Amino acid sequence: MLQVTSRSRSLFYLLAAAIVVVAFLSLSRWLQQGGGTRLDSSAQLHLLSGAAYLCLLAGVGGLRVALRMRRANKGAARPYTSWQVLLLAFALPLAVTWLPDWVALGPSWEARVVWSSTPLWLPVIQGAALTILLAAGGDFAQPQAGGEGGLNGALAGLLAGMGLWLGGAFLYGLLLALVPSLRPPISGYPPVLGGILAASALVLLPVSEELFFRGRLMAEWQARFGRVGGAALVAAAAAALLMRPLIFLPVFAAGVGLAWLAGARGLRAAVFAHLMINALALLVLPALVF
């Protein structure tokens, strides 16, 4: 069972979230000092808005952890509900990302701006927010049927991740050929930002997203919509929250595969498969980051 119940584990996850926040704050200061010359003013504003939101969320999360530790002998604090997590970790960072464009464009703002202005680091901000909530709100993951631990589970996940990535890459290429207008701009990011994106994609996102999506949320939605329906809805939600239409179908297909893997091999295997998918994406498409 992957749970976050003890005081030491809460502090560990909160420390990881604090490191991410410090990294974004350092990057923000670097941008203010003129280091982000490869980013336009709109992109810099997006990044600073996301960093400010993470700081606010970390402060509130830290207060919640402190209160929970103080009330250790009076019963555990109520964990966040799944809908609260979706709002705080995904919807609000998305709104913060859109806010600069909405303020700048005013009445001329259109929905199409979302597709062109959603930055590549949005999933990193969402993953950092999810980690903070994981630290502050208690258990995200539920017991998974079956599964293998240790090296066997990790190896199964890595191999499955290779297969899922190949399938997703095929779908991505097919959609790009059919709808070339959806091709995202590839201009690269400064090395500091690219390094943070890569490190988050390999460490932060696989753990936090699998704990939530294939852990708690899938268990809840499968109980309500059935095994197949719940897994499909979770995969669709995870893909839609990226706000990039070109990769919706590949990410959805990968999410369905990760759901099957979590049920058959356990959540550990799904985490390693997610890691492999992100690693291969960075290796094959480095221009998206660097």
Image (cartoon, rainbow, N blue to C red):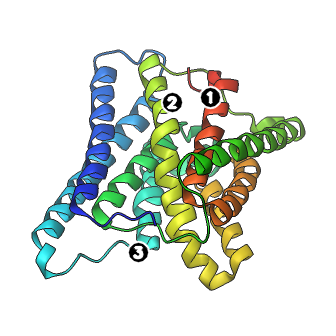
Residue position marked by numbered label 3 in the rendering: 81
- Position of 99 with respect to 245 (left or right) is left
CB of mark 1 within 8 Å of CB of mark 2?
A: yes
Residue at figure coordinates x 25%, y 58% from the top left: 61
Task: Point out residue 120 in the picture as x, y percentages from the top left corner.
Answer: 55, 36
Of the image marks 1 and 2, the number of the one nearer the N terminus:
2
Residue position marked by numbered label 2 in the rendering: 198
Residue position marked by numbered label 1 in the rendering: 282
Give amino acid for label 3. Thr
Q: Nearer the viewer, residue 238 or 164?
A: 164
Label 1 and label 2: CA atoms lie apart by 7 Å
Secondary structure of the residue carrying tag 3 is loop
Extreme-bottom residue of the structure = 224
Q: Residues within 10 Å of mark 2 (few under 14, many from 20)?
A: some
Of the image marks 1 and 3, the number of the one nearer the N terminus:
3
- Position of 176 with respect to 64 (left or right) is right
Of the image marks 3 and 2, the number of the one nearer the N terminus:
3
Q: Residues within 10 Å of mark 1 (few under 14, many from 20)?
A: some
Residue at figure coordinates x 52%, y 36% from the top left: 202
Task: Point out residue 63 in the picture as x, y percentages from the top left corner.
Answer: 17, 60
